[in-house]
Structures are given as C-alpha cells and as structure tokens.
Image: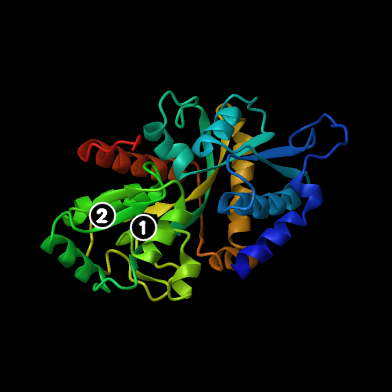
Amino acid sequence: MRNRVRLLAAAVALTAFGSAPAFAANEGAWPSARPIRLVVPFPPGGNSDLIARVYGQKLSEAIGQTVYVENRAGAAGAIGTAAVAKDKPDGYTFLLGDVATHVINRFAIANLAYDPEADFVPVSRLTSVSLAVLANKQRPFNTMQEFIAAAKAKPGSLTFASAGPGTPGRLAMEMLRAATGTDLVHVPYKGSSPAVNDLIGGQVDVMIDGSAGPMVKAGKLKVLAVTGDRSPSFPDAPTLAQAGVSNLKFVSWHGLFAPKGTPPEVVNRVAAELAKIGQQSAVRQQFADLGIDVVTESGPAFQAFIAQQRAAITAIVKDRKIRFDE
C-alpha cells in the first residue's frame, strides 16, 4: 500500500502533465500542434490511472509535448473507450485500454458502443499482470494439487468468489475449472473488496484476483499459484504450469490504443518511445513494487496477443455457457 501511495503522490504531483493546459495551440507537424490527450476509461487512483500517468509523463519528455490524462470512467471502461473510438484520428488522442475494454466487454456488455477490433489501432502493450489463486487461510489445502484434489473429492462443495460476472478473475477461474475438471460454485460480488473480505471471513473458499497482495502479506490469505508468469507480488508462489496445470496461462494487461486511421508514422513513433520507456529500470521498479510486470510489444505482436486471448475467452464463454447478468 505504501508503494501505491508513493506512486500516486508522484503522479498527482505532475500538475502540468495531469490536467489539460490552457495555452493556445500552435499549428504544425505532429506533435507540435497541441497537447496530447490520454484517456483512461477508469477512475483516478487505480492501476490504469497510475500506469497512464507514469508513461504519459515519460512520453511527454521524449516527444517534447504535453501529455495529459483524462479520466472518463463508467461501464467497465466502455464509456471512455467509446469516446476515443469516435475521436478524430489525428494523433492527439490515445486510450489506455486493458483486457476489459478490448476483450471482455464485447461479451459482458450488450450493444457495446464501439468495436474493439475495427475502431482502434493497437499501439503498444505496456504491462502484464499475473492474477493470484487465493484461498481462505483456514481451508485444509495449501497447494494447487491439494485444492484440485479437494474439489474433485466433493464436486460442487467448494465456492469461488469473483469481483463480478464479467471480470478477469471470474473468467480465469472458469478457465481453471475447465482445465482441471473441477466443479465449483460461483459467488459473484460487486467489486473486489467485498469479495476479498468474505474470502478472508470464510464465507467463500477461493478466488482469483490481482489486488489482494496486501492481504496476503498481512497473513490473511494464502496464495496457491499465479495465473501467468512468476509475480513480483508473490515471489514464492508457483505458476499454474509449475503447480501442475500446464494447459492454462492467463494474464491481465494494459496497453495504448489510437483511433482507427491515426497516421502510421505517429503510431510507430509513439510505440518506439514507449518501448524505450519500458526499458528504464526506474519505471520497471515502480511497477514491480505493485506486482506489475512491464511488457512492451507493439503493432502486429500486440494485436496477435489480443487476438489469442480473445479466442481463448470466446471459447470458454461458449463452452461453459457463461452468463454476465448474474
């Protein structure tokens, strides 16, 4: 928590960067015409906001133009994302998107006001976040193998919490159930905090989440495994593959997007600068302290990553007949 507070304080201190400047624009070649707007479709203070402010400040320094963050929260990121999709593709508006805005929302939100594929150019992936398979401290299983064995011994007897029907943690758990052949009862909550609180209290047995690091470090929860690569938040926790679940890997992520039609030279320049920023040791350490890995991949590689994850989630939603209105 102290690391998050320090990073947030540093972001808030960037007053010239964090709010729209009032001076008049000077017309000219990009990026001289005017400041660049970076839309975060989530509230201030969360991971997306912090990531946008750190990368935005560094990008501003690299290109010699102000980059300011605009938070447009609502509807799991759909409101701000739709606004960027409709914006002029002139290189002066970008989106800090994530697995929700560009993979999950197309399933979770009826009549989505944007097309995550057709309306955007993927500029660069920025992060990779392994989620944690968490268990109540009093449950008798301490490893993934013991948890799977307990679930199979009494099908339908164990419960798993989620922060909501269409959240990454819920979908990751559905993938885990499919990969291990376990029968668990889903208990959806309205947000991560109440779900984690009930997991600590023993009202539910397990959960997959990415925000419970402080509770684990405080000894209130135990980690059975992480869903992606080894996590800086849980250095002793094995990956699912290391724990015996070799056919599953799931990560949350953040990335930069531009409206479709943004000039390729602008997209390429921004992607190149972001790649340099992602190699800075100070930036990598800032996010490692929050359990976030810096992963920059641009253009086709980023697009291929999204397509692969989208296909996996499409398959699990269809095969398990997942509903998002629970």
Which residue bears the numbered disc 2?
A: 176
Residue type at mark 2 is Leu
Q: Is residue 29 visible?
A: yes
- Quarter residue 238 falls in: bottom left
Q: Is residue 132 visible?
A: no
Q: Give the residue displayed 32% in from the left and 42% down from the top.
A: 313
The image position of residue 99, as x and y in percent, is: 45, 44
Q: Quadrant of the C terminus?
A: top left
Q: Residues within 10 Å of mark 2 (few under 14, many from 20)?
A: many
Colour pattern: rainbow
The image position of residue 224, as x and y in percent, is: 31, 69
Closer to the camera in the image, 87 or 261:
87
Closer to the camera in the image, 281 or 165:
165
Image side of residue 298 versus residue 107, left or right: right
Q: Residues within 10 Å of mark 1 (few under 14, many from 20)?
A: many
The image position of residue 240, as x and y in percent, is: 29, 64
Give the alpha-carbon distance from disc 2 to disc 1, as whole Å: 10 Å
Q: Give the residue displayed 33% in from the left and 51% down from the top.
A: 172
The image position of residue 142, as x and y in percent, is: 27, 74
Closer to the camera in the image, 15 or 283:
15
Which mark, by number, is residue 208?
1
- Quarter residue 137 falls in: bottom left
Q: Quadrant of the N terminus?
A: bottom right
Image side of residue 318 versus residue 57, left or right: left
Residue type at mark 1 is Ile
The first of marks 2 and 1 along the sequence is 2
Q: Is residue 208 above or below residue 1?
A: above
Q: Give the residue displayed 40% in from the left and 45% down from the top.
A: 164
Q: Give the residue displayed 30% in from the left and 53% down from the top.
A: 173
Q: What secondary structure is found at the residue carrying circle 2?
A: helix
- Quarter residue 102 falls in: top left
Do residues under tags 2 and 1 come within 8 Å of each other at their CB atoms? yes
